[in-house]
Image: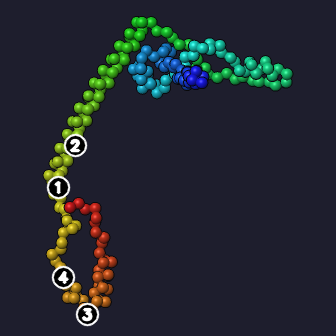
Amino acid sequence: MKLVFLISLIFFLSNCSKPKTVLICGDHVCVNKAEAEQYFEENLSIEVKIVNKKSDIVEDLVELNLSENSLGNKKISISSKKTTNNPIKTLSNEEVVEIKENIKNKKKEKKIAKKIVKKENEFVNEEISKQKKQKYKKETITKSNVNKRRKDVVDVCTIIKKCSIDEISKYLLDDGRNKKFPDITARQ
């Protein structure tokens, strides 16, 4: 029982493995991941070819179906499409070295460009902050405290002719309707 379980486990794991793939940069196999990344950044596309050593025989399904279904009067028209199976170029050692040097040079140029952009951004940010400081110095901002107690409390009975609860409530309701809503977004 253990032997059957081990054999089935090995068979299952061998079938679940990922097929070997190769990245294609233009007309040749990419030298390394850096070249593949660089090619993708420039062209926004990259081809992936699956390397399958087991079956080199290409079976044409159309031909198989035509030979099997030759009994009826069926006609099949085949339209050609643009093939993506372009021949892949094998690179020589000198070409590989040249590609690697180009990759290194482009990486250095990117680093230099990033440093220049950072310096320009810092310079612009300094100028903006100086301009903001000058604006704040010129303008004086007066802040009002919303939670501050009013010192000018007035007796309602002095304003109303008849000082009864009904008249006071009517006066306060009318006064409340005429006032604007408080600004609750104001900072203290």
Task: Report the number of numbered marks.
Answer: 4
Left of 131 or right of it: where is 43?
Answer: right
Query: What amino acid is labelled 1 in the image?
Result: Glu
Q: Considering the numbered disc 4 on the image, is that residue within a helix, a strand or a loop?
A: loop
Task: Please name the residue that numbered disc 2 is placed on.
Answer: 128
Q: Considering the numbered disc 1 on the image, is that residue within a helix, a strand or a loop?
A: loop
How packed mark 4 is, by other alpha carbons closer than 10 Å (few <14, some 14-19, many 20 or more), is few
Task: Please name the residue that numbered disc 3 is placed on.
Answer: 162
Q: Are marks 3 and 2 in contact (CB under 8 Å)?
A: no
Q: Residue 56's spot in the image, x, y percent? A: 62, 13
Residue sitting at 18 percent across and 74 percent down? 150
Task: Please name the residue that numbered disc 1 is placed on.
Answer: 139
Q: Quadrant of residue 51?
A: top right
**Of the image marks 1 and 4, the number of the one nearer the N terminus:** 1
- The C terminus sits in image quarter: bottom left
Report the front residue among 141 and 52: 52
Report the front residue among 38 and 72: 72
- Please name which of the two marks, 3 or 2, marks the residue nearer to the observer: 3
